[in-house]
Image (tube, helix red, strand yellow):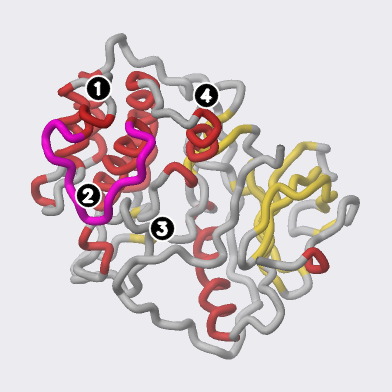
């Protein structure tokens, strides 16, 4: 965790590439940086500023690995335009450290919502979120080259307070799918939500995100985290939450099959099954949302001389640069 002394101060002004940014307050901090609520001076709009700032004495190879992941996240976000993905507004170096400015989300993570309620979500509500997730994941998977998110879980899903729109956050683990490659170079992700191929046993693809979506729905409907590398048995989900329908349970079980050939082969296919589980026709909360184009991203001259560290392929892990993008109480 970065120290208090390392944090930017309220009323600090940070010079960016496209504007200056006035620090309004801290949103959250993690092992490699912090997120702030800022005002863009060019037009007085509110944004989130995410800064990578490693603690003192962090090994150089760890700093370089996380810097590469941070820059990769910015490059990915800089080519995406979708109402369920935060807009990237700026990417620059400040005092030699990478900084990105992105859409400020007035909301809470699904993890926070479940902690507050200490109860599963209602089935129809969870299914609605599942449809939104299917659509944004399908958007990622149909990019050229395809983008595999690889870290879907409740802490990485924010829900806006006013419009109930879901936002995917933290693209630090996402990667582009390389056709013809047998496995991922580095295994990353979160245990319980990651399928077998994400443990270094193969290259991740769209079906890897299908597994994670099934595991996420399992968590939302039972208020219990999924067991790593375990497909629920028929009836198991309904024993934990009798209000879940047989149809919804079957969708989750198929999505979480350990053999990817037996899962839904795309998020679009899974979406159709989720829509059939709904009691009423689905109303898309993003239907009338316009999304501004993201800013183009260029690499930053902030590289260290140390190569990125290679990571043991088992189990998958989450990079230390990941930050808790959530509102302070």
Q: Work out whether mark 3 precedes mark 4 in sequence or the reverse, and give the earlier one.
A: 4
> Given this view, does label 1 or label 3 mark the residue nearer the observer?
1
Determine contact: label 1, label 2, CB under 8 Å: no
Q: What stretch is highlighted in magenta?
A: 222-236
Q: Compute the Cα span from label 1 to label 3.
A: 35 Å
Tag 3's secondary structure?
loop
Placement of 168 over or under 246, stated as above or below: below
Give the residue pinned by disc 2: 207
Q: Compute the Cα span from label 2 to label 4.
A: 26 Å
Q: Which of 146 and 58 is in front in this view?
A: 58
Q: Residue at x 38, y 78 (%)?
A: 311
Q: Work out whether mark 1 precedes mark 2 in sequence or the reverse, and give the earlier one.
A: 2
Tag 1's secondary structure?
loop
Q: Any mark on residue 164, and which?
A: 4
Q: Residue at x 26, y 39 (%)?
A: 267
> Given this view, does label 1 or label 4 mark the residue nearer the observer?
1
Q: Position of residue 317 (x, y in %)?
A: 40, 66
- Report the quarter where the C terminus lies: top right
Q: Compute the Cα span from label 1 to label 4.
A: 26 Å
Give the residue pinned by disc 3: 174
């Amino acid at each position: 965790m970065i120290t208090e002394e390392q944090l930017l101060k309220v009323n600090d002004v940070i010079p960016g590439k496209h504007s200056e940014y006035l620090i309004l307050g801290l949103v959250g901090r993690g092992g490699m940086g912090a997120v702030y609520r800022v005002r863009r001076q060019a037009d007085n709009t509110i944004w989130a500023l995410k800064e990578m700032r490693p603690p003192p004495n962090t090994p150089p190879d760890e700093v370089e690995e996380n810097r590469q992941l941070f820059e990769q996240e910015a490059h990915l976000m800089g080519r995406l335009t979708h109402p369920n993905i935060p807009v990237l507004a700026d990417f620059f170096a400040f005092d030699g450290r990478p900084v990105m400015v992105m859409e400020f989300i007035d909301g809470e993570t699904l993890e926070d919502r479940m902690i507050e309620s200490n109860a599963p979500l209602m089935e129809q509500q969870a299914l609605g979120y599942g449809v939104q997730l299917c659509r944004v994941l399908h958007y990622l998977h149909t990019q050229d080259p395809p983008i595999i998110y690889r870290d879907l879980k409740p802490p990485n899903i924010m829900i806006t307070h006013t419009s109930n729109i879901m936002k995917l956050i933290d693209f630090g683990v996402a990667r582009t799918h390389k056709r013809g490659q047998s496995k991922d170079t580095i295994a990353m992700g979160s245990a319980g939500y990651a399928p077998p191929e994400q443990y270094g046993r193969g290259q991740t693809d769209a079906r890897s995100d299908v597994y994670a979506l099934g595991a996420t729905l399992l968590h939302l409907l039972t208020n219990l985290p999924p067991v790593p590398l375990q497909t629920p048995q028929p009836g198991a989900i309904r024993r934990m939450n009798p209000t879940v329908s047989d149809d919804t349970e079957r969708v989750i079980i198929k999505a979480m099959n350990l053999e990817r050939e037996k899962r839904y082969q795309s998020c679009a296919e899974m979406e159709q099954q989720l829509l059939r589980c709904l009691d009423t026709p689905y109303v898309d909360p993003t239907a009338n949302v316009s999304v501004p184009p993201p800013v183009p991203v260029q690499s930053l001259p902030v590289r260290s001389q140390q190569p990125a560290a290679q990571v043991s392929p088992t189990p998958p892990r989450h990079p230390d640069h990941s930050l808790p993008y959530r509102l302070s109480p």
